[in-house]
Amino acid sequence: MTTFLHSVEECVDHTIATVGKDLVVAAPLGLGKPVQLLNAFYRRAAADPSLSLRIITALCLEVPHPKDSIEKKLAEPIMQRLFRDYEELAFMAPLRAGALPANIHVSEFYVRAGSMVGNATAQQNYISSNYTHIARDMDIHGVNVLVQLVAKRETGSGMELSLSCNPDVTLELFDLLRERDVRGSVVTLAQVHADLPFMEHDAQVSVEEFDCVVDNRDYDRALFAVPNGSVPLRDYAAALHASSLIVDGGTLQVGIGALGDAVAHACIIRQKDNSHYRQMLSAITSHQAVDTDLGEFEQGLYVSTEMFVNGMLHLIEQGIVKRRVYDNLQLQRALNAGVFEELLDQRFVDWALQAGFIPQRLDEDSLDALKFWGVLPADTGLDADSVVVGGTQFANDFSSDEARATLSTLVCGRQLQNGRYMHGGFFLGPRDFYQRLHDLDVAQRSAICMTGVRRTNQLLLDYPLYCAQRREARFINTGMKVSLSGAVASDGLENGTVISGVGGQYNFVAMAQDLPGARSILCIRSTRGSGDDLESNIVPAYGHCTIPRHLRDIVVTEYGIADLRGQSDAEIIKRLIAIADSRFQQSLVDHACKVGKLEKGYSVPVYARNNTPEHLQAALAPFVAQGSFPEYPFGTELTEQEMALAASLRHVKSLADEPTRMAREFIRALLHREDEAAAHPWLERIDLEHPDTPREYVIQQLLLLDLEDRGLLKVR
């Protein structure tokens, strides 16, 4: 029986009494962590050295805390507005400080990109695993406490619970624990949050799945909401290239980050203003490297994705994600072949009877299936040898012409039901994203299924069905570096430093190799850094690999598309160099020639010799002026002043990497005389009216110069 508790402390008491003092706690990725419950476990263990607490999780969310004093002055009011009264995970501050008590350990499978660089404790306790293996690997460590934030709703039959944002791993953990028959040695704990969207289907679970449920509105602090990120121009360029590879009527997956928003934005332009979309793509495409699909999304897309991102919901709202799939292989294959459509007619009836989808005689199971798919009305029943629908009764024998005719009358004009246009593993996004999920109508909610990554990230559960559903799949993710062999590094550095995690990337790349018609698209910025620290992300070789060379497929940079599948090593090198930054192309050619991978005297094709930021900016300048590439494509909670200040501070910070240019800009700034009245609100916002140090004075002058250069500040 499930125990309902009022406080998290009672839940900790119950857990220790059940499993003892050695606690191995599994918590979901991201939003699904019950913060107050985890904090109660942490506080109890921190106060009692006789307890052993190990927390195994992924992506611990933190409110940003800028260290730079000026950035902090800009950020603090924004943080208060965005994160409100969100309660932080209590173990993160001591983890960052290297001050976790000796009896407490935290291991993550995936960390926020770059957040744990230089943190020895986090680096040492990191567990590298494909996302489809996380439940298994948690189980290996002897998990005896499973915690989850859940949504609830009250119905006439009682309380219902939903795993909401994170059925991804929890569903499989439930199964693993049942297989181990761990009753009495493992506890499952839920904390209800009133603001968490209630997601149905696979995410909906029985209350009895949990030993204890904490349901207390005093714990309903603000959900962690990730603000919409800004999208730089070169990410828009890469997204334009990637979006041209998405096939109407196909399947889409997009990974975490600004790229997801950029791809969604590009798809919306492709749908709403197709000629404009083609013009933008033409402006940055000097060589057609691969077959593309530039038309509107008439059939629409189906989404099977690990992460359900904000951009995906916009694609649903714009009618781009609308292709429904059905968990019946026979039905799905017939739909794919165009034998009939979702609005049923005589073609469906003829097919269904011939294929045995509607058997000659109905029994209770076949009748329930036909009602589930919407083929027959919900009030259809069986009575002896008759089928009864409302006031109509006819023989339960479809070998007769009369029964077939009656069946056609009942079926034709009906709409197939229980198709899904989205299967997602977990979601995380801005506050309005959660509200829009709350506000979904019945039809939209029915078409979205939050489920386990064992379904979204692989084919093993039902290869024939998933092949039929995931036709023309395009799996779009990001990487950090690609070697000339086609191997990609996405999660770590050569020295072993963990940057983020493998997550589901390998799963999707491998799936693209196994699915007929599927492609993996890895988007990589051509360079990183600036000034003297500028370096190419297309490199001769790299000592860390996330995606091995034998799984190479499509690589995209802001400069174009390199189709690597099935190509020779020499051809792969040529295609990668063609989408590299031109400042590094010759050194890459020289290396490949030196080691015998390219023929002597090879020259970069003429069409690829102008791959520079300046050329890209010039090509897209008319579209930037028209507002085609907004800094925040799906809106922001920042004010216009805050966005401008943030952009200017980023510019000033980038100058630090180029001392000569910085000195030149500072001299230019000193020669300007800004209107003090116009400058006042900008400087007041970040408390920089009266600089206290020479450094602050330099920043003040460079900031005002950048604002003036962008037309935001008048000069006397």
Image (spheres, rainbow, N blue to C red):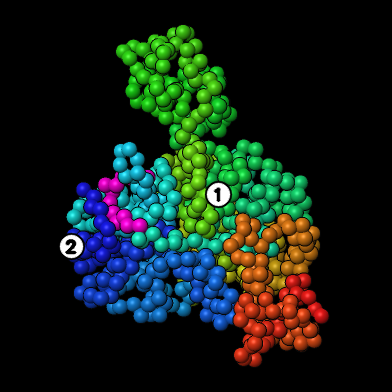
> In the figure, 652 relative to 284: above or below?
below
Percent x, y for residue 578?
A: 71, 62
Q: Is residue 468 visible?
A: no
Give the residue at x 65% y 84%: 689
| Residue drawn at (20%, 68%) of the image | 21
**Could you tell me residue 99's position as x and y percent?**
35, 80
Residue linked to disc 2: 17
Query: Magenta segment range?
Result: 204-217
Residue 484's mark?
none
Residue nearer the viewer, 281 or 522: 281
Within 10 Å of disc 1 (Cα), the crowding (few <14, some 14-19, many 20+) is: some
In the picture, residue 618 is in which quadrant? bottom right
Q: Position of residue 314 (x, y in %)?
A: 59, 49
Residue 716 is left or right of residue 550, and the answer is right
52 lies left or right of 605: left
What is the crowding at mark 2: few (fewer than 14 residues within 10 Å), some, or many (at least 20)? few
**Residue at disc 2, secondary structure:** helix
Q: Is residue 215 magenta?
A: yes
Q: Which residue has dot 1 on it?
A: 313
Task: Answer above or below: position of 377 versus 652.
Answer: above
Whether residue 127 appears in magenta in the rendering, the answer is no
Quadrant the C terminus occupies: bottom right
Q: Is residue 174 left or right of residue 533?
A: left
Relative horizontal placement of residue 560, taking residue 302 as reference (left or right): right
In depth, the one of 342 and 329 nearer the eye is: 342
Q: Residue at x 26, y 65 (%)?
A: 9
Report the amino acid beneath label 2: Ala
Amino acid type at image mark 1: Leu
